[in-house]
Image: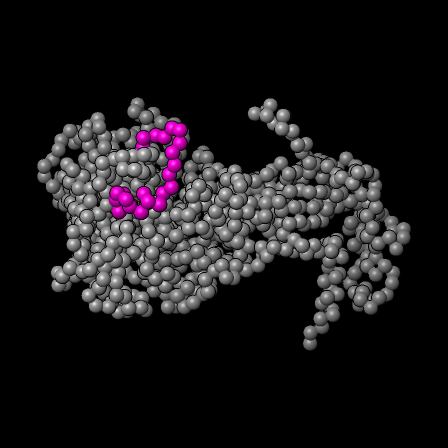
Amino acid sequence: MVEPMKKVNYIVVLLLGIGFAGAAQEQGWQGKFEQLDQLLPTPNSYRSASGAPGVAYWQQRADYVIDVELNDENQLVTGSETITYYNNSPETLSYLWLQLDQNILQRDGIKDKTTPSSVMDSIPTRYFAGFVGGFDYEGGYKIKSVKDAATGKDLPILINFTMMRVDLPAPLKTGEKYSFKVDWSYTEYDRMKFDERGGYEFFPEDGNYLYTLAQWYPRMCVFDDYEGWQNKQFLGNGEFTLTFGDFKVRITVPSDHIVGATGWLQNPKEVLTKQQLERFESAKKTFDKPVLIVTQEEATKKEKDRSKKKSTWVFHAENVRDFAWVSSRKFIWDAMAVKVGDKTPLAQSLYPKEGNPLWEKESTKAIRNTLEVYSSRTFDYPYPTAYSIHTASIGMEYPMICFNFGRPKKDGTYSQRTLEGMVGVIVHEVGHNFFPMIVNSDERQWTWMDEGLNTFLERETTRTRYPDFDVTSGSPKGIASFMRGEKEQMRPIMASSDNQGKSFGPNGYTKPSAALTLLRETIMGPELFDKAFKEYAQRWAFKQPKPADFFRTMEDASATDLDWFWRGWFYSTDNVDTEVDEVKWYRVRSTIADPEKKNVKVKAGEVIGGDGSKANDFSAGPQEFTVTDFNNGKETFRNAEFRSIIDDKAIRGKLEGKNIYEITLKNKGGLISPVIIEWTYKDGSKEIERLPAEIWRLNEKEVKKVFMKEKEVVTIVIDPGQETADVNSSNNSFPKRPQANKFDQLRKN
Ligand SMILES: [Zn+2]
């Protein structure tokens, strides 16, 4: 039988005896600890409430067979592809959508039309050239034909800027597949002129090109359980949302070029010299250092020749969501094998001599570090290879291959900053193999799902493998300056990628990384966090997760309710600003004079200023207060039955002579945060105490908490290690730091 009365009494005892709590302050409630409820989609059979793929989870699939030729004279790319599309959805499809990403550089394209611009007093030429057609480049796809693969009949198409609808000759039912053929061409662009992800770099000194081909073929859009056909145009910031499949790609280039691509080279005997082939074979068995397959001397020698012959490099890739490739006669090539679990992927780097001596020393090593650390936090890297390609000024990722900046000066010297930037971008872009190439999130909608998770693991890799590098970026300390900005000007992390404006960088990359770092180091602890994070990665490897799947899995796998954390960090622009409003120091009065004076705080010295102001330091000494007997010597209906368990004398004895501190904290920034308190004692020793964020659950604006200490405290500092992204450390200490006036501050600067 339930006895509610007893329970109520017991709670009263706890509050009085341990908490010293005053009346709860109800006005501090803003619902910040409530569940996300309608902010998340309702779980269903496709996506479960645990955050795992549901029992009826499905995803589409598209296989590609592509022939492509690159003309080194006029930069024309000519391709022909057969796409086989598998309808695994429960719906019947009467049309398909493809992405025509090259159309972002079309004259009068949607990016041009929707990018605001304005005239200022002085504007670089490149600004106008980019926006109002100052370059003579004719961008965009020329779609030559779209045909049924079996009958050869033309299919009706409709192009909507960066997307193309293909009407099917007959409805495609559940479980059926359909093959069709697309022929196209476009002229590759100069990446040094346009802020795009593929393109080429021309080297005027030797007259050669380095091509990086990306978004170079019409690709299937995603059709899924979440929004049907993906329908967000390619505007530049929001990247890609893609379907898995197998690729067989034949790449024809001048025969003195070296090609790297998504996938494994199928015909090394046809395209490599005997010597290159021997070195390639030896690299596959070498784990301790990179093996040069094409040396700098050999590559430099080739720069003067122009082969009229062509070679066709054949690459196959299984279960990838995209395919990119690179080609140049300038490439130096090194490779080495990496051990992850029972797999031995080949780490490969391609770079022109302009990247050396930095690249031969660092690139392949950075690939190895990335594959090892990321695999330990997620799943063993499943692909047979990972390339790092040197390209000026960008970092960009594709399955098994990525483009990375970091170029020494002409004399071969480089700064620590260049080194850290170069290693950082390689770790980051190789890391993208895990997010979003394998854990295949929708980049067009949510940048943070791949960039944020990836920036977090990039930082973890740098922190553990390059201990002398600066890892402030992506940490809570690093994000504080951004979060200190005007909240009204910001967007939350969850805002759509192309609507982020100036918040794009922090919200896509460093703020989610800082949030995850805070979650790992401070809120959950590494053991719980790593287990839950790995669970998410393994549940959604080779699948298409959405934000709720991440949020739910992190909670489900760790038994930690984090709704307050996602609400504050991902759905709001609040910041952490914890203020130490007041600290009171007490000692227990040794004898109880008057039982009527129960729990009255008696002044011993002027702690509170005569004008009612709060104490700024401990100089006034402790106040005294009385601890009375539990029942005050009276038998009452409410406490009578507890007499036997409360030993008034013993409890009073434990408090005798102790320093008791009551701290009042204020949440000035709105964002709920754990509280880390550093106590410094009179003898110089220190102690760190950690209070979980739930300390704020009864009042989200102000909280009091009482602590008992043997030793006398001289200073109290909140968040001494800057681990909570507190935007204002000047109100974190007691005794309160004297506020420097504006004039003094200016003089210091
Ligand atoms: Zn990235």
**Which is more toward the observer, 692 or 109?**
109
Give the residue at the far right of this rendering.
Answer: 593
Q: What residue is shown at x 83% (from left), y 46% (from top)?
A: 602
Q: Position of residue 511 (x, y in %)?
A: 48, 44
Task: Name the quadrant of the C terminus.
Answer: top right
Image quadrant where residue 353 sits: top left
Residue farthest to the bottom? 1
- Identified at 18% across, 54% down, the residue is 182
Magenta stretch holds residue 106: yes
Residue 74 seen in the figure: yes
Quadrant of ligand 1: it is top left
Q: Position of residue 484 (x, y in %)?
A: 54, 40
Residue, far left:
308
State which region is magenta. Answer: 102-126
Front residue of 561/442: it is 442
x and y percentages locating residue 279 in the rendered image: 21, 39
The residue drawn where x is 36% and y is 30% is: 123
Q: Which is more toward the observer, 215 or 231? A: 231
Magenta span has 401?
no
Corner quadrant of residue 221: bottom left
**In the picture provided, is 182 more to the left or to the right than 629?**
left
Left or right relative to 398: residue 458: right
Residue 91 point in image, percent of width and height: 31, 68
- Which residue occupies the foreground of this view, 114 or 171? 114
Q: In the rendered view, would you say 96 is above or below 201?
A: below
The colour scheme used here is one colour
Q: Quadrant of the N terminus?
A: bottom right
Residue located 36% across and 51% down the image: 444
